Amino acid sequence: IASCVRVDMGTSGLSLGSVGLSLEWDTAVLDLQEGGITHADPPFGNSALTLDESGPTGVLRFSAADPNGRAGDVFVLCAPFAVIGAVGSRSPLTLSLTSLFSTTLEDFLPQTVVQSGEVLVGQACRFGDVNGDAMIDSGDALMILVHSVGQGGMLPAAAQQRIQDGCGDVNRDGATDP
């Protein structure tokens, strides 16, 4: 999985001049893949990244500044994780912005909406294989249809659990739907 940070400067008409952020997670559930961390290409001016995974909570801190700035939808950082926790374990992915300024030094932090998340470790599954028979066929499609019309309680408990674990999300849009 990956946690990616973008800043939409489109409606402001200004350019992003600097950003500071931290990302926290449970190190017993997620392992940051340091070599896969990416940030703006071309690089966002001068940047610094620090990482602390010595305790139960991992912390990545990132800051960058560019006097020329970036306009529009600005890609800031993407941090990939390997899932190492047991099935049923959870880890928050808590994003905190510590600074966000335009190139004209306008502080955007007070009006910023930050979306953090949580990772729930589920059973590995093949997307679309709701009945767990290692095939994706009309039986799975029927179960997804039954679930999507609100009759999921009629399905076998194992199929209901696989749908809850995300196995019915065929197009990976976050929902089990036809």
Image (spheres, grey):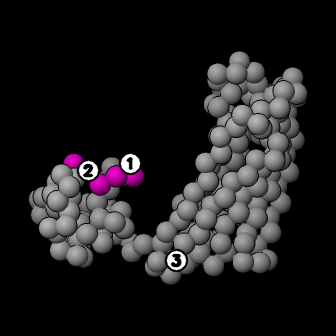
Q: Residue furthest bottom?
A: 86
**From which residue to which does the magenta span run?**
174-178
- The type of residue carrying mark 3 is Ser
| Secondary structure at numbered mark 3 | loop
Q: Would you say residue 37 is visible in this rendering?
A: no
- The type of residue carrying mark 1 is Asp
Quadrant holding the N terminus: bottom right
Q: Is 39 in front, or is 149?
A: 149
Residue tagged by mark 3?
A: 89
Q: Is 103 in front, or is 152?
A: 152
The picture quadrant where one finds residue 134 is bottom left
Q: Would residue 177 be counted in the magenta stretch?
A: yes
Q: How far apart are marks 1 and 2 (CA)?
A: 9 Å
Q: Are marks 1 and 2 in contact (CB under 8 Å)?
A: yes
Residue tagged by mark 2?
A: 177
Residue 173 is tagged as 1
The mark that comes first in sequence, 3 or 1, is 3
Query: Where's residue 161, x and y in %?
Result: 30, 72
The picture quadrant where one finds residue 91 is bottom right
Q: How far apart are marks 3 and 2 (CA)?
A: 26 Å
Question: In percent of the image, x 73 and y 69: which residue is there?
Answer: 58
Q: Distance between the residues labelled 3 and 1?
A: 22 Å
Question: In percent of the image, x 20 and y 55: which residue is there?
Answer: 150
Query: Where's residue 174, x and y in %?
Result: 39, 52
Query: Where's residue 122, x and y in %?
Result: 42, 72
- The type of residue carrying mark 2 is Asp
Q: How packed is label 2: few (under 14 Cα within 10 Å), some, or many (20 or more)?
A: some
For residue 119, above or below residue 29: above
Q: Classify residue 33 as left or right of residue 109.
A: left
Q: How packed is label 1: few (under 14 Cα within 10 Å), some, or many (20 or more)?
A: few
